[in-house]
Amino acid sequence: MKIKVTNPIVEMDGDEMARIIWKYIKKYFIYPYLDIKIIYFDLGLKNRNYTNDQVTIDAAKAIKKYNVGVKCATITPDKKRMKEFNLKKMWKSPNGTIRNIINGTIFREPIIINNFPKKIKNWKYPICIARHAYADQYDSVDFSIKNKGTLYLHFIPDNLNKNNEKKIQIHHFSSPGIAMGMYNTEKSIYNFALSCFNYSIYKKYSLFLSTKNTILKYYDGKYVDIFKKLYKSKFESKFKKLNIKYEHYLIDDMISKVIKSNGGFIWACKNYDGDVQSDCIAQGFGSLGMMTSILLTADGKTFESEAAHGTITRHYKKYKKGIITSTNPIALLFAWTKALKHRAYLDNNDDLRLFSEKIEKSCKTFVEEGNVTKDLLLSMNNLNINKYLDTESFIKDFKKFLEKKLKI
Ligand code: NAP
Ligand code: MG
């Protein structure tokens, strides 16, 4: 009998090789086991162009309404894609559009395979990066200075009250140089902190925030203050009950702590740090095909999951020519299981939670027993495995493996 899922899930289809794998996942792992209502949006580039990108906005609104979304990888168009798809406009990244409407924090986390050789041997548990995806360098102004002169930071209040005006000299240039101005808002930092604390509780993981507040006393100091105040007022007792902790570290200390650790925590990063560190963590753990990404709102309720990788264009080009590919479907599969787990969490649906956990656990065991795609084989190198499965065989063999596990 199929498991009854009481509330719907919003599904967003995507592009290229990820879209091909997506179809298999639904056919083999979702439809046969679940009695579920799926609210479907085709975010494939063709349809985004056809609907003038309205489909992305509608999908984001549906996620807000139903609280759970699962997204396939999509093409973010550039000049080359404009030509290839004969686009009306260079549509924005769907992820950016969805994030602006839902307003959450991005958490990236690797899927850990036990016997997988890791570049950092002591990393036993996932390190989950929370990136404050708002402002700082990504919404800054920068320019080069060619002449001698003085650079100021100047704030003019809307009400033109002279008492609140601030003009601070930054530097006097006696030779050419460069300059940058950036900002953030208390509201956005507060929501970031709230998402992080809520996700810590959901995952039962400790939370560490890194900043450079010794140098940026007001800027990074604000992050430290907001996190601390929120922790003390709303989360300390909940954290203590779960035996997890919240701590702030200087980013230099945090990096050495991360390298020495066994993993198993959430690392809250400022925008730029999160961008850079998540690539470092992904590499440290192995393959892009093993990295998942979720977007979670500050109240911990609205949730969207996806694979961290893209549409895997190089593999799709081969696939279209009829060449067999060996593309790793695991992160795309886990995007589904994570969305199902969140649905289960919101609806108190134990059967659904157990089913999703069973898929995840079985998939790890399946790989640990030596069933791998090419990317995994390449990063395993010294193990006794010397052959890899093609995309479809991996999925079909895993389906058989799962069937056996579900019967036990
Ligand atoms: P990509 O799709 O992540 O692929 C880059 C390379 O990483 C692949 O060519 C492949 O290497 C390897 N790889 C990634 N995922 C893999 C998997 N599941 N199994 C095996 N190998 C995997 O990045 P891209 O080629 O830079 O971008 C392609 C398109 O995806 C672009 O149009 C971009 O806009 C879009 N994109 C979307 C998202 C999103 O929707 N969240 C994110 C990133 C990029 P080899 O070729 O060496 O095997
Ligand atoms: Mg990056």
Image: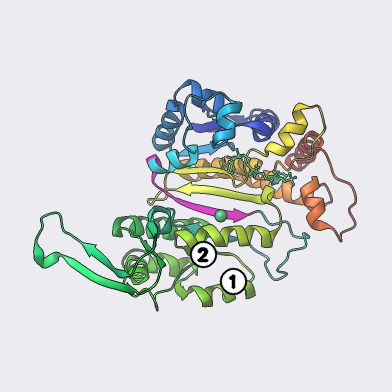
Q: Is residue 217 above or below residue 304?
A: below
- Quickly name the residue at label 1: 258
Which of pointers 2 and 1 lies earlier in the amino acid sequence? 1
Q: Which residues are magenta?
A: 101-110
Determine the image quadrant of residue 341: top right
Q: Would you say 185 lies left or right of 25 here?
A: left
Q: Are marks 2 and 1 in contact (CB under 8 Å)?
A: yes
**Quadrant position of the C terminus in the picture:** top right
Which amino acid, by three-letter code, is at mark 1? Val
Q: Is residue 393 above or below residue 174?
A: above
Location of residue 153 in the rendering, given as x and y in whole percent from the top left corner: 27, 66
Determine the image quadrant of residue 229: bottom left
Does the stretch in magenta take in 112? no
Note whether residue 254 is visible. Answer: yes
- Mark 2 Cα-neighbour bin, 10 Å: few <14, some 14–19, many ≥20: many
Location of residue 349 in the rendering, given as x and y in whole percent from the top left corner: 52, 41
As measured in the structure, the alpha-carbon distance from the residue carrying label 2 to the one carrying label 1 is 9 Å
Which numbered disc covers residue 267? 2
Residue depicted at 51% across the width and 54% down the height:
107
